[in-house]
Image: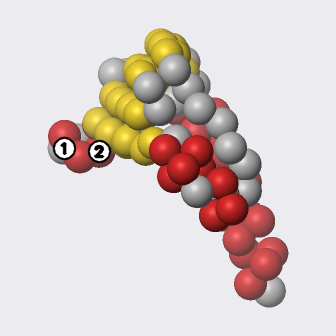
């Protein structure tokens, strides 16, 4: 598994919605936020924090997770896709 498959990084800001509310569907602003989450089913750890409207999320795969659940989920998604194509 490569590093690209194991780590995801995202960043976004609230400033556009605050400075130009007519362009946004909603306006919110985070002064300070922090969250750490472990998803046992997928084996991911998520670190999220926001400071003065700047948001950052880092997700890292640290374990295989529930492989049986992931297989069942993938089969359900493929089944739905096959139904839409038919």
Secondary structure beneath dot 2 equals helix
Q: Which residue is mark 1?
A: 2
Query: Position of 15 compared to 22: left or right?
Result: left
Q: Which residue is mark 2?
A: 5
Inspect this view and state whether residue 46 appears.
no
C-alpha gap between disc 2 and disc 1: 5 Å
Query: Position of 72 compared to 3: left or right?
Result: right
Q: Nearer the viewer, residue 39 or 28?
A: 28
The answer to whether marks 2 and 1 mark residues whose Cβ atoms lie closer than 8 Å is yes
Q: Residue at x 68, y 44 (%)?
A: 27
Inspect this view and state whether residue 39 appears.
yes
Dot 2: few (<14), some (14–19), or many (≥20) neighbours within 10 Å? few
Q: Nearer the viewer, residue 53 or 9?
A: 53
Quick one: quadrant of the N terminus?
Answer: top left
Q: How many marks?
A: 2
Dot 1: few (<14), some (14–19), or many (≥20) neighbours within 10 Å? few
Looking at the image, residue 46 lies above or below residue 73: above
Query: Position of 42 compared to 24: left or right?
Result: left
Residue 39, horizontal then vertical, whole percent: 54, 21
């Amino acid at each position: 598994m490569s590093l690209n498959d194991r780590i995801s990084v995202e960043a976004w800001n609230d400033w556009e919605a605050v400075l130009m509310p007519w362009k946004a569907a909603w306006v919110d602003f985070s002064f300070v936020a922090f969250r750490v989450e472990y998803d046992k089913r997928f084996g991911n750890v998520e670190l999220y924090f926001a400071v003065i409207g700047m948001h950052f999320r880092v997700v890292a795969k640290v374990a295989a997770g529930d492989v049986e659940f992931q297989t069942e989920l993938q089969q359900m998604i493929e089944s739905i896709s096959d139904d839409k194509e038919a």
